[in-house]
Image (spheres, helix red, strand yellow):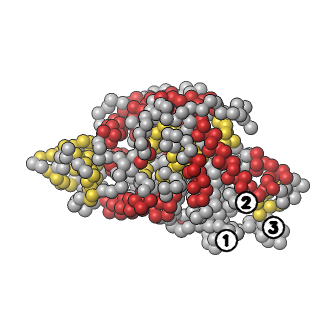
Amino acid sequence: MSQQPSAAPAPTSAVATVSERHDWWRDAVIYQVYPRSFADSNGDGMGDLEGVRTRLPYLRDLGVDAVWLSPFYASPQADAGYDVADYRAVDPMFGSLLDADALIRDAHALGLRIIVDLVPNHSSDQYEWFKRALAEGPGSPSRDRYHFRPGKGKNGELPPNDWESIFGGPAWTRVTEPDGTPGEWYLHLFAPEQPDFNWEHPAVGDEFRSILRFWLDMGVDGFRIDVAHGMVKAEGLPDLGSHEQLKLLGNDVMPFFDQDGVHAIYRQWRRILDEYSGERIFVAEAWTPTVERTAKYVRSDELHQAFNFQYLGTHWDAEELRTVIDRTLDAMRPVGAPATWVLSNHDVTRHATRFANPAGLGTQIRLAGDRALGLRRARAATLLMLALPGSAYVYQGEELGLPDVVDLPDEVRQDPAYFRGAGQDGFRDGCRVPIPWTREGSSYGFGDGGSWLPQPAGWGELSVEAQTGEPGSTLELYREALAVRRATADLGAGDAVEWLRAPEGVVAFRRGEFVCVANTTGESVAMPAYGRVLLASGEITEAAGEAKVPSDTTVWWTRA
């Protein structure tokens, strides 16, 4: 499958060179790298691990604590690497296991931790287990490791149940048996190339416990668990009884998502992680109906963090923000877990574009909107997020204020959902366009051989080179915000805010001597000057103990 060494290089120590800070993950700022779009070291138009490694000093200087890498495993790339063919190998397009080892070592030497993606809900259809299951036919033990079922109808021509794929169409595909006849169906909640594992089979659990140890021995500091709410399916795979099931996601517990059985898996995994020194962590990508159900994933004997998708989907509205902040903190407090806050990732429209459009359009938007408004709100939203108690996630390029690329030609798109009718909108490519490093060049410093998705004209003016040292640039705002956050005792970890009286449309809270005010309205507002200004996302004026906070602006004060 892979022409690489089958064994890992010599293990590194995850605690020997990174800064030892107790419970570091409770207030960490974690930067998501989408490897194919971050930096290309060999000029083939595709980002790679060596490209990431050469840019690690940039991430250290930005001020983040850890780097989360989206999948770089051996894969046919039917879904950008989330269809894994070998969990212990690096895909040649990204490099080798030696490159992964060098990246981990260099990151630790710079004081950065490395978190890797883990994809346990499904494999690639090119995974050895699945290929064997197809070859061995019905009734074989190999098929028990996936969800193979006979079809309904007179000749088995109908899917086994009514479940729909997240990417559109039925969640089942019928196979051709070794003798050439139409045969059983297999379950895939995502693309047909991503068959779901059957986690009731003990071999599946054994395999993933081994995979965890492989990468922990390599020195990684944790895992982000893809589709952490999946894996376990309701007994008997019952019909859901409705169509347009995607509209129900996030509103109800589904027979294929957020089943209580997943928690037994995570308790097993946590025991493995706790055997290793250096405070390694798990982060759950868990889409649940409520933050209260999300909290179940981060009980003290399970995972450490879970993404707060309720916050990501909140509009730029003071009342909505206060509500989701309160609900999040209230849900996490009883289980002793930190809240997490995130505004963008590789699956949603960048928040600089979401906030450029009217509320209510969802998290995948095809309209550019008001670019200036979107950037102003994005900067303000970032300062608000970084002021909240807990851990924060930054998606690559958001520190440059990048908008989504909403006008990619159809012929260059690669999101599998784009080609599958009634599934997700299929426009995730817009947030995955390679980021610009320099003002000029074939791919604005991404690499010497262009980029796998076309970059817009003018991308260079948003580049790292263009913004570095430029007063008021979004990059310098992020650098200063992360430095202030690290240096301010009342920021970072915690589980509560003290809300302050504020005009309608304004979020205001205190944390010790620190005060944050975010004006979400379209007009300037007058507020008390709460002390010395630490940072603001826009220009403010102060006089006679009062501050004038412009529209869509966040201000940090300290009374210390």
Going from N to C along the chain, the mark reached first, 3 or 2, is: 2
- Identify the image quadrant of the N terminus: top right
Q: How many marks?
A: 3
| Dot label at residue 248 | none
User: For the residue marked with disc 2, what is the amino acid?
Assistant: His
Quadrant of the rendered image containing residue 182 = bottom right
Quadrant of the rendered image containing residue 447 = top right
Q: Label 3, on which residue?
A: 156
Where residue 532 sits in the image (x, y, percent)? 19, 43
How dense is the environment of label 2, judged by Cα within 10 Å: few (below 14), some, or many (20 and up)?
Answer: many
Front disc: 1 or 2: 2
Q: Label 2, on which residue?
A: 147
Using residue 303 as the reference point, say whether residue 515 is left or right of it.
left
SS under mark 2: loop
- Residues at discs 1 and 2 in contact (Cβ within 8 Å): no
Where residue 35 sits in the image (x, y, percent)? 55, 37
Residue 20 to residue 233: above or below = above
User: For the residue marked with disc 1, what is the amino acid?
Assistant: Asp
How dense is the environment of label 3, judged by Cα within 10 Å: few (below 14), some, or many (20 and up)?
Answer: some
User: For the residue marked with disc 3, what is the amino acid?
Assistant: Gly
Q: Residue furthest bottom?
A: 241
Question: How far separated are the C-alphas under marks 3 and 1?
Answer: 16 Å
Q: Residue at x 56, y 32 (%)?
A: 12
Q: Label 1, on which residue?
A: 239
Q: Residue at x 49, y 63 (%)?
A: 293
Front disc: 3 or 2: 2
Q: Residue at x 74, y 66 (%)?
A: 159
Front disc: 3 or 1: 1
- Residues at discs 3 and 1 in contact (Cβ within 8 Å): no
